[in-house]
Image (cartoon, rainbow, N blue to C red):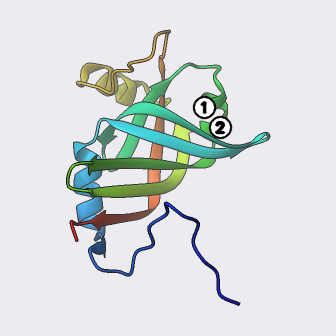
Amino acid sequence: MTTTPPRNITTLSGNGLRELQVDECLDLLAQSSIARIAWCGADGPRIVPVTIALHDGAVVFRTMAYSALAGAARGSTLAVEVDGFDLATRTGWSVVAVGSADTVADPAELVELWRQDGPEPWAPGVRTLFVRVVPHRITGRRIAHR
């Protein structure tokens, strides 16, 4: 049985598509300030944008203490996705870090995080809960102009 891709979908033959090494992924992650956090909740997959920072090898972001994201972040696995693209040249990259998430409770670490520049949430509201995602798998891809 042969499958035909839907119209308007481009399939990649491998030309121009490159898997990134972990160190490249970490560099791109460290340079990013906006990410999407994904998890599977009781009502299915959820994805929300957040501002992030890389702190001691972990992705850190702030959220509201009683939000769905806060509930998902307590002792679970989350995915963090960052990307960059240029529509004019049709180039870009994407990095996904999957890891164990939990809230930051250590007072000394909280003081350090509050003193650092970022992550400063863009969304309105009181976002005082710091969440840490310690990656156990990091993957990435880059597509170059073909």
Which residue is pictured at 47% across the width and 33% down the height? 49
Residue 48 is situated, as x and y percent measured from the top left of the image, at 53, 34
**Residue 48 tag number:** none
Residue placed under numbered mark 1 in the picture = 69
Q: Amino acid at mark 2?
A: Ala
Image quadrant in which you'd find residue 13: bottom left
Residue 51 is situated, as x and y percent measured from the top left of the image, at 38, 30
Q: Residues within 10 Å of mark 2 (few under 14, many from 20)?
A: some
Q: Residues within 10 Å of mark 1 (few under 14, many from 20)?
A: many
Marks 2/1: CA–CA distance:
5 Å
Residue placed under numbered mark 2 in the picture = 72
- Residue 53 vs residue 46, the one in the foreground: 46
Asked if the residue under mark 1 is in contact with the one under mark 2, i.e. CB atoms within 8 Å, the reply is yes
Image quadrant in which you'd find residue 143: bottom left
Position above or below: 40 against 11: above
The secondary structure type at the circle numbered 1 is helix
Position above or below: 93 against 86: below
Position above or below: 67 against 143: above
